[in-house]
């Protein structure tokens, strides 16, 4: 299992990635499967050698809000693989006011081929900047 977090509030631009500052857990074979440079928003994964595909479960969660001065309305996050948003992982929140946080979480099962590394990120799919706090990302072998 690999667990990445970002506790501090960060502003994530529209179509931008949530940045993960801490890698708090790499256990078992995931050290070989998952690569992340702290402070970045992209995580690289590769399949296990000798397997055609390695099944992974990816789970993200975060508190999100519209920043002061932003337009109060629907905001969202989603998981993207190789730059493509997985629609079933998009989570929406509509705050009543700026700086009002709501929690979003989603998961996806992904088959990673042994011959082709994949990259994934948690992306702001809203049409404006959003605030993200207490973000977490867990990658585990299914």
Image: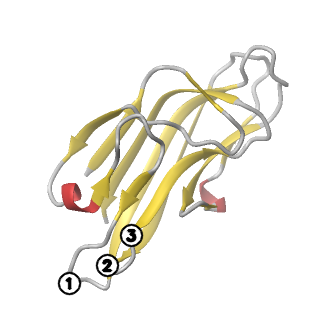
Relative to 32, say whether 61 is above or below. Answer: above
Label 1, on which residue?
A: 50
Measured Cα–Cα span from mark 3 to mark 2: 7 Å
Relative to 26, say whether 110 is above or below. Answer: below
At label 3, counting other C-alpha atoms closer than 10 Å, the crowd grade (few under 14, some 14-19, many 20 or more) is: some
Residue 43 x, y percent position in the rendering: 41, 52
Q: The residue tagged with tag 1: helix, strand or loop? A: loop
Quarter residue 18 falls in: top right
Label 3, on which residue?
A: 117
Q: The residue tagged with tag 3: helix, strand or loop? A: loop
Residue 31 x, y percent position in the rendering: 20, 55
Label 2, on which residue?
A: 114
Q: Residue at x 33, y 68 (%)?
A: 46
Q: Residue at x 44, y 40 (%)?
A: 40
Quarter residue 65 falls in: top right
Q: Earlier along the polypeptide chain: callout 2 or callout 1?
A: 1
Dots 2, 1 in contact, CB < 8 A: yes
Residue 71 located left or right of residue 135:
right
At label 2, counting other C-alpha atoms closer than 10 Å, the crowd grade (few under 14, some 14-19, many 20 or more) is: some
Residue 73 x, y percent position in the rendering: 83, 31
Measured Cα–Cα span from mark 3 to mark 1: 14 Å
Q: Nearer the viewer, residue 44 or 101?
A: 44
Q: The residue tagged with tag 2: helix, strand or loop? A: loop
Residue 117 x, y percent position in the rendering: 38, 70
Q: Residue at x 38, y 34 (%)?
A: 5
Measured Cα–Cα span from mark 2 to mark 1: 7 Å
């Amino acid at each position: 299992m690999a667990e990445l977090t970002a506790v501090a509030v960060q502003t994530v631009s529209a179509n931008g990635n949530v940045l993960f500052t801490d890698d708090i857990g790499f256990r078992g074979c995931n050290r070989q499967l998952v690569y992340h440079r702290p402070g970045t928003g992209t995580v690289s994964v590769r399949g296990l050698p000798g397997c055609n595909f390695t099944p992974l479960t990816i789970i993200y969660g975060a508190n999100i809000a519209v920043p002061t001065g932003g337009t109060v309305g629907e905001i969202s996050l989603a998981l993207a693989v190789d730059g493509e948003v997985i629609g079933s992982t998009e989570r929406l929140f509509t705050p009543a006011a700026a700086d009002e946080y709501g929690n979003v979480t989603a998961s996806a099962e992904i088959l990673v081929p042994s011959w082709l590394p994949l990259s994934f990120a948690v992306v702001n799919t809203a049409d404006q900047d959003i605030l993200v706090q207490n973000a977490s990302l867990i990658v585990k072998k299914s």
